[in-house]
Image (cartoon, rainbow, N blue to C red):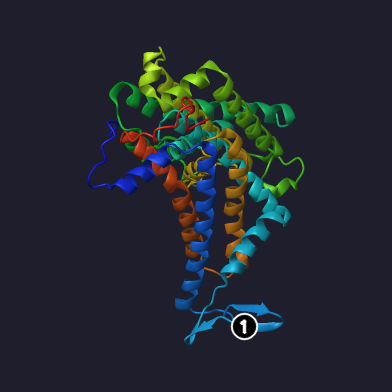
């Protein structure tokens, strides 16, 4: 399609829209993501409201109060059981005002920072990485297996805890990096579609982890041994039972800043970005695209593995089947941030708020958990859709519209 011809089936308007999307600057992509987020929230509110029409009200129907008058939500004799404004109010209030709600928000934020970075670095190299969840699962498994064995080898205390945490994190990073390198090698040397390989590796990772715990370790339940409190990251500011550590959050922020610097001020970061924007030009200028692909996916796997270790060593204390889908949420975080490490911090905080708020929501808003899952799905789908379409358009060979004279050289990522 790079010859400028417009396919008959696509239509000139759709083609022009795709060209504009491909050529969108990072600021424009952030605006698109924010608008998509607002639209998703509005659609979610409508969904909650309509769902109340077919539900059996356990309490009084939803009521709005206006100028001191109670206005029950009724229309044509139908009572609506759920108040969508109250649902989102409880979601935000529960995650940002209560001490344990704040702890859950920051816990999710720390993990989402790592998974968001894992996805972002892949996207910046032009790779559509869906494999962070599998890398997180195996990283969590590595920490959950190595940690309890080290506990039996060291003395309890600060030094022993530091050894357990350090070695467990290292093991998780190595395992995650290896798992991330596999689709990278397949993409670089066999031109295997990374979307398909990473999705399949997610499934394999889950099955492999269950097999290791159940058949190799011989655990009666599909979970590893629990770590003692002294061998886990402990809270510094919030209560000790809050299952959040400021050290993990600070480490994730440091990694975010480091990755931002590498992407923008190092030769490797330049090669990575050029390979993602113009792979042919990168090859022509002497960049080893295959090496960049493998290195990028390996780093993405390391970050995913560290996210899994953070979940086990900070939040849960052991590995168990059913690791939360932080890896998939990381895709939305990265997309909302336009794949920029600088934007991942507020994006991770926002989705950390949503994730922790849904826990409070199940208790405080009297809506079924299935509705909460649908709300999160609507938000993730609509926020991720524009970037997914943009990536596909780039793969189809659609190029941005021709730039006015005097503006040549400006790229979509400037």
Question: Residue at 63% across / 40% down in the picture?
Answer: 314
Quarter of the rendering containing residue 399: top left
SS for tag 1?
strand
Question: Residue at 42% across / 27% down in the picture?
Answer: 276
Quarter of the rendering containing residue 403: top left
Q: Is 80 in front, or is 328?
A: 80
| Tally of numbered tags | 1
Describe residue 200's horizontal placement relative to residue 135 as left or right: left
Whether residue 401 is visible, yes or no, is yes
Q: Is residue 160 above or below residue 32?
A: above
Q: Is 152 in front, or is 209?
A: 209
Describe residue 236's horizontal placement relative to residue 82 as left or right: right
Q: Residue furthest front?
A: 405
Residue under pointer 1: 71
Q: Residue furthest top?
A: 286
Question: Residue at 33% across / 44% down in the picture?
Answer: 15
Please provide percent x and percent y for residue 113.
58, 38
Whether residue 202 is visible, yes or no, is no
Q: Residue furthest left?
A: 8
Please provide percent x and percent y for residue 350.
60, 49
Please provide percent x and percent y for residue 392.
35, 39
Q: Is 139 in front, or is 319?
A: 139
Describe residue 113's horizontal placement relative to residue 290 as left or right: right
Q: Is residue 84 above or below residue 79?
A: above
Q: Residue furthest bottom?
A: 77
- Determine crowd level at label 1: few under 14, some 14-19, many 20+ residues with C-alpha closer than 10 A: few
Quarter of the rendering containing residue 129: top left
Query: In which quadrant will I find the N terminus?
Result: top left
Please provide percent x and percent y for residue 12.
30, 46
């Amino acid at each position: 399609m790079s010859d400028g011809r417009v396919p008959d089936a696509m239509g000139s308007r759709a083609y022009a829209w795709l060209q504009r999307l491909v050529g969108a600057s990072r600021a424009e992509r952030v605006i698109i993501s924010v608008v998509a987020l607002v639209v998703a929230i509005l659609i979610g509110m409508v969904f909650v409201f309509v769902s109340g029409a077919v539900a059996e009200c356990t309490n009084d129907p939803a009521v709005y109060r206006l100028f001191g008058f109670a206005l029950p939500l009724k229309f044509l004799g139908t009572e609506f059981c759920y108040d969508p404004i109250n649902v989102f109010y409880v979601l935000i209030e529960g995650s940002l005002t209560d001490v344990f709600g704040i702890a859950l928000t920051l816990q999710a934020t720390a993990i989402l920072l790592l998974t968001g970075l894992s996805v972002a670095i892949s996207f910046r190299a032009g790779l559509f990485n869906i494999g962070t969840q599998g890398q997180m699962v195996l990283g969590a498994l590595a920490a959950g297996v190595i940690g309890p064995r080290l506990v039996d080898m060291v003395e309890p205390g600060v030094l022993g805890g530091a050894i357990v945490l350090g070695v467990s994190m290292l093991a998780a990073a190595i395992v995650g990096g290896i798992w991330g390198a596999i689709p990278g090698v397949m993409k670089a040397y066999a031109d295997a579609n990374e979307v398909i390989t990473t999705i399949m590796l997610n499934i394999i990772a889950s099955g492999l982890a269950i097999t290791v715990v159940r058949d190799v370790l011989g655990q009666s339940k599909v979970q590893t041994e629990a770590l003692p409190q002294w061998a886990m990251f402990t809270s510094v500011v919030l209560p000790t039972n809050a299952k959040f550590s400021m050290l993990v959050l600070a480490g994730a922020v440091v990694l975010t800043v480091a990755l931002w610097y590498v992407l923008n001020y190092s030769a490797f970061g330049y090669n990575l970005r050029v390979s993602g924007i113009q792979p042919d030009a990168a090859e022509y200028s002497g960049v080893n695209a295959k090496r960049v692909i493998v290195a990028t996916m390996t780093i993405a796997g390391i970050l995913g593995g560290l996210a899994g270790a953070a979940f086990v060593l900070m939040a849960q204390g052991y590995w168990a089947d059913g690791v939360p889908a932080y890896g998939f949420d990381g895709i939305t975080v990265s997309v909302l941030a336009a794949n920029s490490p600088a934007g991942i911090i507020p994006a991770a905080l926002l989705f950390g708020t949503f994730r922790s708020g849904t826990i409070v929501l199940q208790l405080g808003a009297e809506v079924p958990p299935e509705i909460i899952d649908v709300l999160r799905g609507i938000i993730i789908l609509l926020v991720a859709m524009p970037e997914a379409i943009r990536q596909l358009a780039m793969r189809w060979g659609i190029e941005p519209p021709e730039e006015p004279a005097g503006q040549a050289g400006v790229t979509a990522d400037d």
